[in-house]
Image (cartoon, rainbow, N blue to C red):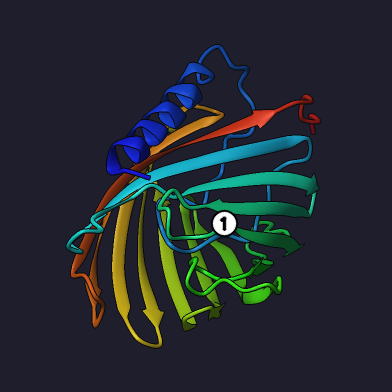
């Protein structure tokens, strides 16, 4: 698959999402896994699915751009299926299951847990057996008005990791986030800002510095769109 074809695929994904981003009824706003590496404890509301698409540039010769996507599908009010869809041809899709064990409520923290399954992270690592490749626990706590802290810890196919993220809502539309990602082999400091186009659509920009890794920095942007096929229950 050529670089041109990858760019066209990414562009078409963005255009499709934007086409469905207008004329929506106001409701509980979208929550995404972007633009940081961490994830929160929450899952999608029932009767919904969500597409999150990003483009990321890194200073790696010959492999500068990545266009990975995430499809999230609600299974219940406490569980979702997550399909990580790489658009680089040497990588394989991964399947995740995520559960919200405890919902955050006021100063009570929320806890989520997910497992990652597949046959390998790349075509060279792929095998015949479908197996568990990693797991993650996410703890999310509201600290003050607009400020949320998230802690992740777990295991990925390439080693153990931990993460600490702070996210602050500047307004109803803008949120800024900063995080420190500590992998057993490398570290990353990441920051980003998100903007809500409407209750179902979010765009973001992000950037980060890496240490003891094959690249020194990364910058990117993305868009996410939630699709609800049944009206959310009103409280």
On the image, the x and y values in percent for residue 152 come to 53, 73
Q: Nearer the viewer, residue 183 or 190?
A: 183
Q: Is residue 170 left or right of residue 155?
A: left
Q: Residue placed at 18% from the left, 70% from the top? A: 216
Assign a secondary structure to mark 1: loop
Quadrant in the picture for residue 184 = bottom left
Name the side, left or right, on which 203 lies relative to 144. left
Residue 139, located in which quarter of the rendered image?
A: bottom right
The answer to whether residue 228 is seen in the rendering is yes
| Residue at the disc numbered 1 | 93
Q: Image point 38% across, 47% down: which residue?
A: 67
Q: Nearer the viewer, residue 45 or 53?
A: 53
> Splitting the image into 4 quarters, where does residue 119 fall?
bottom right
Quadrant where the C terminus lies? top right
Location of residue 192 in the rendering, given as x and y in whole percent from the top left corner: 32, 51
| Disc 1 residue crowd, few under 14, some 14–19, many 20+, Cα 10 Å | some
Q: Nearer the viewer, residue 235 or 53?
A: 53
The N terminus: image quadrant:
top left
Q: Position of residue 229 (x, y in %)?
A: 75, 26
At a point 25% along the width and 58% down the height, the residue shown is: 63
- Residue at 62% in and 74% down: 127
Tell me residue 231's x, y (percent). Answer: 77, 24
Residue 144 lies, with reference to residue 16, above or below; the image says below
Residue 189's place in the image compared with 223, above or below, is below
């Amino acid at each position: 698959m050529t670089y041109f074809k990858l760019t066209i695929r990414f562009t078409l994904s963005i255009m499709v999402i934007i086409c469905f981003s207008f004329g929506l009824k106001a409701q509980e706003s979208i929550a995404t896994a972007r633009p940081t590496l961490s994830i929160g404890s929450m899952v999608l509301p029932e009767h919904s699915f969500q597409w999150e698409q990003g483009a990321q540039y890194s200073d790696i010769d010959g492999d500068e751009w990545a266009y990975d996507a995430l499809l999230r599908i609600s299974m219940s009010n406490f569980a979702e299926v997550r399909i990580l869809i790489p658009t680089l041809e040497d990588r394989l899709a991964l399947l995740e299951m995520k559960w919200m064990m405890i919902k955050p409520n006021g100063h009570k923290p929320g806890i989520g847990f997910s497992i990652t399954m597949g046959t390998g992270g790349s075509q060279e690592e792929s095998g015949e057996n479908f197996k568990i490749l990693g797991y993650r626990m996410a703890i999310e706590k509201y600290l003050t008005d607009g400020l949320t802290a998230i802690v992740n810890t777990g295991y990925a196919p390439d080693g153990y990791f931990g993460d600490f993220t702070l996210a602050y809502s500047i307004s109803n539309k803008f949120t800024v986030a900063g995080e420190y990602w500590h992998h057993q082999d490398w570290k990353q400091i990441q920051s980003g800002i998100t903007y809500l186009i409407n209750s179902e659509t979010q765009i973001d920009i992000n950037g980060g510095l890496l240490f003891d890794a094959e690249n020194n920095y990364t910058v990117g942007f993305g868009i996410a769109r939630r699709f609800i096929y049944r009206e959310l229950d009103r409280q």
